[in-house]
Image: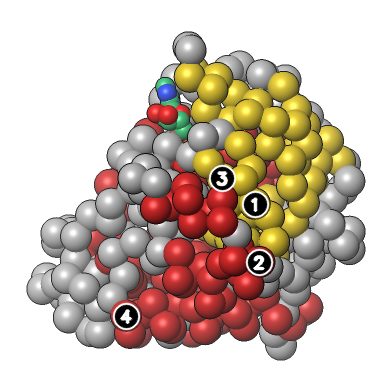
Amino acid sequence: MSGTDDSVTDGSTPTEEPIEDDSMPAEDVPTEDGSPSAVTEESDGDADAPTDAETPDRTVHAPEDAGVSVDSTPLEVEGLRRTFGGIVAVDDVSFDVERGTLTGLIGPNGAGKSTTFNLITGMLEPDAGTVRFNGEEITGYQPHEIANRGLVRTFQIARELEEMTVLENMMLAPKGQAGESLWRSVLPVTRGDVRKQETDQLERVWEVLDFFEIDHLADEYAGNLSGGQRKLLELARALLTDPDVLLLDEPFAGVNPTLEKRLLEHIHELRDRGYTFLIVEHDMDLIMNNCERVIVMHQGRILKDGTPAEIKESEEVIEAYLGGEV
Ligand SMILES: Nc1ncnc2c1ncn2[C@@H]1O[C@H](COP(=O)(O)OP(=O)(O)OP(=O)(O)O)[C@@H](O)[C@H]1O
């Protein structure tokens, strides 16, 4: 896809050809099962984008604490349940996510992973159960209220953003709270005050683009990016919101091995800096090789929660995956 010149802020003309780089050809990145596209396609990239029909009109809760908490267990899920008609998609799901870890959430198709993500991020309301973030109960909060607190999920680049450049996509990303953030605490950024926030934002955008090694694509239309480059851009946009915990839904779908390696290196580096990740991924090996902790869901319930070694040895996990239900 090519864009129009007037969408380029700095007057430069983006290339019209798809970028080869070291990634797969540009294509729409498939969603997990098609269903999350209601979230991602409808989204303009804001972390508060509602789903088409699922987000009810709810009270807006004022953030109580804009700073980054040091809670050692930032995310606590307790007894979550959600049904769709007669289908119990998520049934009494409880788990914690420890700070500064990569936690994988895996399971066969229809296990309830996406629904769990949607319940945590406020896209869906649970029938029962609670979600706590940094000690605060956030169950039933609106998606943007949850994102504002630092619990952020990545979104696919929406169609309208494909006609904007990478730089424009970054500048339009939701801004984090002014003040402390993990990103600012680890990078030598300028010490702007609030009035300089926009200048700082631009500077930060370049730092994040540089970190993900996509700064050379700044003037490229997002629609021209390969699947893997889009994933990097999606993560880069999420980073700008000053997240504390990042929820990644199929971050490696449509990503070629070279870029997958790069993406993983970036995720590991961010984890080492204190970011926390919960990752839904179909590629079991990838999760086993990269996450400290793996939660396996099956038929809406937690089947096993443990280290990769424990998961590998679990008869019930092997059975769930080999039982013809994958
Ligand atoms: N909006 C919905 N309406 C009706 N049923 C739904 C809805 N969303 C999910 N389900 C059902 O809930 C169950 C869990 O689905 P979910 O998408 O959460 O699983 P998943 O583990 O993410 O699966 P996959 O890996 O295939 O994406 C499935 O039986 C699914 O068909």
Q: Earlier in the sequence, mark 1 or mark 2?
A: 1
Work out how far the residue at label 1 is from the one at label 4, CA to CA, in angstroms.
Answer: 28 Å
**Does the image show residue 263?**
yes
For image coordinates 43% across by 52% down, the residue present is: 321
For image coordinates 78% across by 62% down, the residue present is: 98
Residue position for label 4 = 257
Residue position for label 1 = 304
**Does the image show residue 37?**
no
Relative vertical location of residue 324 with respect to residue 1 in this rendering, above or below: above
Q: Earlier in the sequence, mark 1 or mark 4?
A: 4
Q: Residues within 10 Å of mark 2 (few under 14, many from 20)?
A: few
Mark nearest the camera among 3 and 4 is 3
Work out how far the residue at label 3 is from the one at label 2, CA to CA, in angstroms.
Answer: 15 Å
Work out how far the residue at label 1 is from the one at label 2, CA to CA, in angstroms.
Answer: 9 Å
Amino acid on which the number 1 mark rests in the picture: Lys
Q: Earlier in the sequence, mark 3 or mark 4?
A: 4
Work out how far the residue at label 3 is from the one at label 1, CA to CA, in angstroms.
Answer: 7 Å
Query: Residue 290, percent across and down?
Result: 56, 75
